[in-house]
Amino acid sequence: MLRGVAAHLFSQLIKPPTQLPLHSPVRRASVDLIGRGFGVWCEFVNLTAVIMTLLELQTDPLVPIEIKKAIAQSGNIPGTGNKECLAAAATVRAAYQASILIANNKPQQTVTALSKEILTFKCDVEAGLSIQSLSVFPSSYHTVLDKGRYPIYLLVQNIIEKTKARDLAAIIVKIVEIMLFCIDTEQFKTRTLSELVPSLTKNVLIDYCSATQQVVVGSAEGLVHVFDVKNTKCTPLHAHNAPTSAVSLATNGRTLVTFSESEGRVSIWQSSSGLLSLMSPGPLKLVRVVDALPPLSTNHPSRSPLFKWEATKLVSLYLSDGTKKSFACVALLPLQVHL
């Protein structure tokens, strides 16, 4: 019975009956039921198809961006516009609310589905294939991705805010990839990452340097991913043999420190210096590994370790037990300074 109900709701979402208006109350009711009961329907429907269709509904050109923003901020539809516009706005609201409910129910699966589709999109575009030529394939969501950056941004922003930090760590790299896809890179010339995505920079696994326009992200696999926001290219660094617990860039972007609490080590990375690197720092290279504390089998349950820069070449690590250790970020100086 559940399978039949799920299939009916799914068909109403994907291909509503032709005899009904596109923005009919019946379709909105199906959208609402899919969102509210996704924990029940999820094993019978294609999550990617559901999410992408809900995003497509939110890109309806009949609804001005001002109304879409009002829906995202308050859930209300401003009482302006003709009957057709208001009906489309009601569908946009239903789709927005349903996508939020699904993302809250299945955050990792939602992020993974979006990340996979965006990766395919970027690969095809880099290969020189146009969005118009790719959109003719039934399985292609390229048009939705190209037009749906704002609703994708809102959806992932909600996931960041509602997902616990420990659960977020497993998908944090994919989240940053998605957000960089959604944000116009020109905005980084005048605004910081904390201004563009406030909730993202509260995470100790993420740091941003406005001087070099780089985002660094630690991962549960011990890798640290360095994103160049100008071209969204990513360079992975093998920083630890255990989950990364904290990362931080110096204000000039030429020094990176990473820490793994499970491993008990701090890794210090520096970019090349000299005349050729004045305009653009070279790739980060590992210069020191410091034993900060004995490896821990479990992390502190209530707080995360974090770095704080005392000077350009001096950084302090505040551990999860409240203690502080400071390190000189110069390869030839003594390995560790205790304060």
Image (cartoon, rainbow, N blue to C red):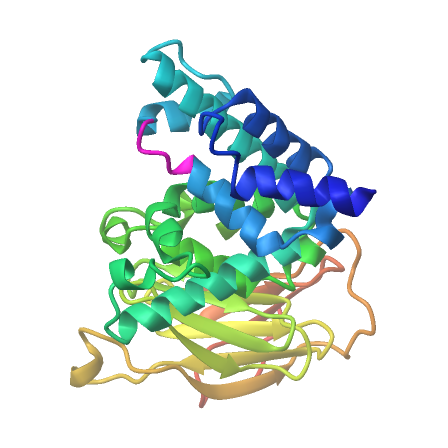
Q: Nearer the viewer, residue 191 or 103?
A: 103
Q: How many marks?
A: 0
Residue drawn at x 38%, y 38% is: 59
Quarter of the image for residue 26 reads top right
The percent coordinates of residue 222 (x first, y second) are 62, 77
Answer left or right for 315 relative to 31: left
Answer left or right for 67 relative to 168: left
Q: Is residue 307 visible?
A: no
**Looking at the image, is 57 positioned above or below residue 128?**
above
Q: Quadrant of the C terminus?
A: bottom right
The percent coordinates of residue 44 (x first, y second) are 73, 52
Residue drawn at x 49%, y 26% is: 20
Q: Nearer the viewer, residue 54 or 273?
A: 54
Residue drawn at x 36%, y 34% is: 60
| Residue placed furthest toward the front | 19
The percent coordinates of residue 329 (x first, y second) are 46, 77
Q: Nearer the viewer, residue 235 or 86?
A: 86
**Looking at the image, is 168 positioned above or below residue 290?**
above
Q: Is residue 57 magenta?
A: no
**Looking at the image, is 95 positioned above or below residue 50?**
above
Q: Quadrant of the N terminus?
A: top right
Q: Is residue 61 magenta?
A: yes
Report the magenta stretch's main SS.
loop
Answer left or right for 63 relative to 10: left
Residue drawn at x 34%, y 66% is: 232
The percent coordinates of residue 241 (x first, y second) are 66, 84
Magenta residues, as a range?
58-62
Quarter of the image for residue 195 reads top left
Q: Nearer the viewer, residue 89 or 105?
A: 89
| Residue placed furthest toward the top | 79
**Looking at the image, is 314 positioned above or below residue 34?**
below
Q: Is residue 273 visible?
A: yes
